């Protein structure tokens, strides 16, 4: 297992869970259902890669990237 962290941000659980299942054997994968929670977590534990849906409830993925 590599010591890389991937954040998956998607409000559809089946999408997040599918990506997590595909990557979990090789990477540390954390899932979030909204951008706000992912941003808060990234302040303390920055990911190496973030996969984010652009159509999220609340703050959109595009706004979160700013």
Image (spheres, rainbow, N blue to C red):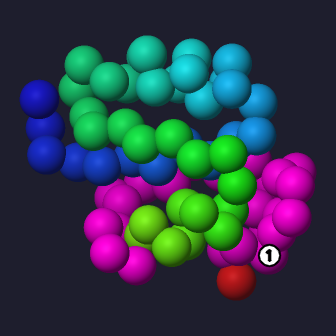
Task: Find residue 47 and report its horizontal and vertical position in percent.
Answer: 36, 60
At 55% from the left and 71% from the top, the residue drawn is 39
Highlighted range, magenta: 43-65
Left/right placement of residue 12 relative to residue 31 reads: right
Q: Under tag 1, what secondary structure?
A: helix
Hey, which quadrant is residue 48 in on the image?
bottom left
Quarter of the image where one finds residue 17 = top right
Residue nearest the viewer, comparing 54 with 41: 41
**Count of numbered labels shown in the rendering:** 1
The C terminus sits in image quarter: bottom right
Q: Is residue 1 above or below residue 63?
A: above
Quarter holding the N terminus is top left
- Residue 65: image location, x then y, percent: 67, 74
Residue sitting at x 40%, y 79% = 43
| Image: 30 above or below 40 | above
Whether residue 10 is situated above or below residue 19 in the rendered picture: below
> In x, y percent, where is residue 59?
82, 69
Residue located at (37% from left, 38% from top): 29
64 to 50, vertically: above or below? below
Residue 20: give x, y in percent of width and height: 46, 25
Is 35 magenta? The answer is no
Left or right: residue 34 versus residue 54 is left
Q: Is residue 46 left or right of residue 50?
A: left
Residue linked to disc 1: 63
- Mark 1 surroundings: few (<14), some (14-19) or many (≥20) residues within 10 A: few
Please name the residue shown 13% across and 46% down the image.
3
């Amino acid at each position: 297992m590599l010591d890389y962290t991937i954040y998956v941000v998607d409000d559809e659980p089946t999408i997040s869970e599918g990506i997590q299942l595909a990557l979990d054997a090789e990477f540390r994968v954390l899932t979030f259902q909204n951008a706000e929670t992912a941003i808060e977590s990234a302040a303390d534990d920055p990911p190496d890669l973030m996969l984010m849906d652009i159509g999220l409830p609340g703050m959109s993925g595009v706004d979160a990237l700013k």
